[in-house]
Image (cartoon, rainbow, N blue to C red):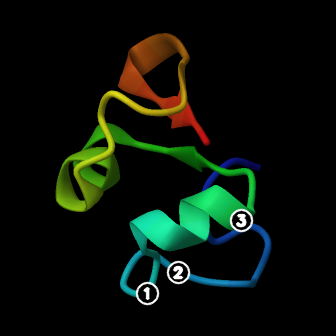
Amino acid sequence: MIGEEISGDTNQENITAEYLEKTTCILPIYLQNRLEVQEKGEELSNRLRVF
């Protein structure tokens, strides 16, 4: 399973750019755009990015 909700720690409505600095997660492009973090993290396939 992949995504910000797998940890049970947060969900897409509550995730922030600051949260990404404290944890590891994989985000789809729509969340990257909303959080304005498209150039951060490591790019994976299908426009996913790990933070």
Residue 19: x percent and y percent?
57, 71
Circle on res. 11: 2
Residue located at (46% from left, 29% from top): 48
Q: Identify whether 20 is placed above or below 8.
A: above
Q: Are marks 2 and 1 in contact (CB under 8 Å)?
A: yes
Q: What residue do we see at 30% from left, 39% from top? A: 29
Distance from the alpha carbon under mark 2 to that under mark 3:
15 Å
Q: CA distance from mark 1 to mark 3?
A: 14 Å
Within-10-Å neighbours for mark 1: few <14, some 14–19, many 20+: few
Crowding near pointer 3: few (<14 within 10 Å), some, many (20+)? few
Residue plotted at (54% across, 31% down):
41
Residue 51 placement: quadrant = top right
According to the picture, the residue beneath numbered tag 1 turns out to be 14
How far apart are the alpha carbons under marks 2 and 1?
Answer: 5 Å
Q: Regarding mark 1 in the picture, which secondary structure is present there? A: loop
**Amino acid at dot 3:** Lys
Coordinates of residue 6 in the picture (x, y in percent): 74, 67
Q: Is residue 43 left or right of residue 1?
A: left
Secondary structure under tag 2 reads loop
Q: Is residue 22 above or below residue 8?
A: above
Give the mark, 2 or 3, whose residue is nearer the N terminus: 2
Assess whether mark 3 and mark 1 are in contact (beta carbons under 8 angstroms): no
The crowd level at tag 2 (other Cα within 10 Å; few <14, some 14-19, many 20+) is: few
Side (left or right) of 37 relative to 21: left
Q: Which residue is at the front of the view, 6 or 32? A: 32
- The residue positioned 42% from the left and 64% from the top of the image is 17
Q: Nearer the viewer, mark 1 or mark 3?
A: 3
Q: Secondary structure at mark 3?
A: helix
Three-letter code for the amino acid on which mark 1 is drawn: Asn
Which kind of residue does numbered mark 2 sit on? Answer: Asn
Q: Earlier in the sequence, mark 1 or mark 3?
A: 1
Q: Residue under circle 3?
A: 22
